[in-house]
Image (cartoon, rainbow, N blue to C red):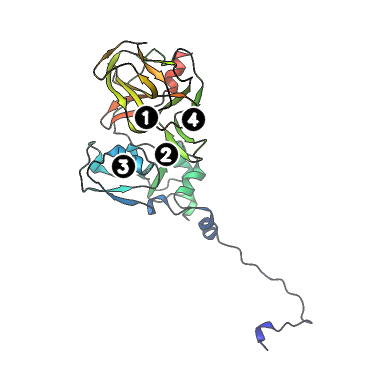
């Protein structure tokens, strides 16, 4: 008889102590591996740009610039090996003694999300490691602030439209994943007129990847506006544009986020990184206050 299977029926009952998992064991079940342990390498191929590489990994260009100084002049060289993080954000060196709460408050990030994305490390008194990944924080060159947008006083549609998808980090209602949306999606019927919100020069007018039919206008104020998914285009590259001039009509070209017809509208400012997207909501608040 197998001695392991012998039971002593008359023995006194004993309390069985069930071992409880340690904090680190529980953390391993809940937390993903630290973001900085999941970096990939990418070798730049002919024809690739910072923007195309970022799109390939579902990132935004500032994230690649943050992790690769070689890209911070805005140029990419074939054969260069660059670092690709698992998602958007930056890595920063944290002063000694700072806690997760300190860092979260400083960068306006939820402390629990910050802790988990860094792998839930066991540190004394909730202090952070020396290097921390900050999800959703965009790198930008020091000393450069976006120019004010007060010179752009128009509106891209004949009426105040409903915003179906806003600006920034959002849970995409169809893809069911967190994405960075660089503008506003404004609901309007196909064929609705689209207008320039200010004076400028048409920098681009034509088909452009996911944007579909796109009009890009550079404004004197150091701003750029983009009008995407158009059905038709009424202007040409190099053409001077006045405020409220007809650019085209609302459509569904390219790869819009929704089947419903809408205008994808962006405001960008000129920086050493190129044309960087900014939040159009503050602009809309000025228009409709």
Residue occupied by mark 2: 136
Q: Comparing marks 3 and 1, which lies closer to the viewer?
A: 1
Who comes first in sequence, dot 3 or dot 2? Answer: 3
- Residue placed most toward the observer, 286 or 178: 178
Q: Decide: is 164 above or below 24.
A: above
Judging from the image, what secondary structure is the residue with disc 4 in? loop
Q: Decide: is 34 above or below 13.
A: above
Return the x and y of residue 240 as percentages of the image width and height.
26, 13
Residue occupied by mark 1: 211
Q: From mark 3 to mark 1, how far is it between C-alphas?
A: 17 Å
Q: Which mark is residue 89?
A: none
Q: What residue do we see at 42% from left, 47% from top?
A: 97
Q: Residues within 10 Å of mark 1 (few under 14, many from 20)?
A: many
Q: From mark 1 to mark 2, how far is it between C-alphas?
A: 23 Å
Q: Comparing marks 3 and 2, which lies closer to the viewer?
A: 3
Who comes first in sequence, dot 3 or dot 4? Answer: 3
Single out the residue that lies furthest toward the bottom: 1
Q: Are marks 1 and 4 in contact (CB under 8 Å)?
A: no
Who comes first in sequence, dot 2 or dot 4? Answer: 2
Q: From mark 2 to mark 4, how far is it between C-alphas?
A: 27 Å
- Residue placed most toward the observer, 138 or 255: 255
Q: From mark 1 to mark 4, how far is it between C-alphas?
A: 14 Å
Residue occupied by mark 4: 259
Who comes first in sequence, dot 3 or dot 1? Answer: 3
Return the x and y of residue 209 as percentages of the image width and height.
34, 33
- Residue placed most toward the observer, 112 or 275: 275
Q: Comparing marks 1 and 2, which lies closer to the viewer?
A: 1
Q: Comparing marks 1 and 4, which lies closer to the viewer?
A: 4
């Amino acid at each position: 008889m197998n001695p392991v299977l012998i039971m002593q029926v008359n023995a006194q009952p004993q309390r069985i102590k069930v071992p409880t998992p340690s904090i680190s064991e529980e953390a391993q079940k809940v937390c993903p591996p630290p973001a900085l342990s999941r970096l990939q390498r990418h070798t730049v191929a002919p024809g690739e740009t910072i923007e195309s590489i970022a799109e390939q990994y579902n990132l935004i260009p500032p994230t690649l610039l943050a992790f690769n100084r070689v890209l911070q002049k805005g140029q990419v060289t074939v054969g260069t090996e660059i670092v690709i993080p698992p998602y958007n954000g930056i890595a920063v060196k944290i002063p000694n003694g700072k806690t997760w709460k300190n860092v979260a408050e400083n960068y306006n990030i939820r402390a629990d999300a910050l802790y988990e994305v860094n792998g839930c490390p066991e540190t004394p008194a909730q202090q952070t490691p020396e290097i921390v990944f900050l999800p959703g924080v965009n790198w930008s060159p020091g000393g450069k602030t976006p120019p004010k947008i007060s010179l752009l006083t128009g509106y891209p549609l004949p009426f105040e439209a409903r915003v179906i998808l806003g600006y920034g980090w959002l849970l995409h209602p169809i893809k069911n994943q967190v994405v960075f949306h660089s503008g506003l999606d404004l609901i309007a019927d196909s064929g609705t007129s689209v207008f320039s919100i200010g004076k400028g020069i048409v920098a681009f007018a034509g088909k452009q990847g996911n944007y579909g039919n796109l009009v890009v206008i550079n404004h004197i104020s150091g701003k750029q506006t983009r009008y995407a998914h158009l059905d038709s285009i009424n202007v040409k590259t190099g053409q001077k544009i006045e405020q409220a001039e007809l650019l085209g009509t609302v459509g569904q070209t390219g790869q819009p986020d929704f089947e419903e017809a809408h205008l994808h509208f962006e405001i960008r400012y000129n920086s050493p990184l190129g044309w960087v997207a900014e939040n159009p909501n503050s602009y809309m608040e000025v228009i409709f206050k």
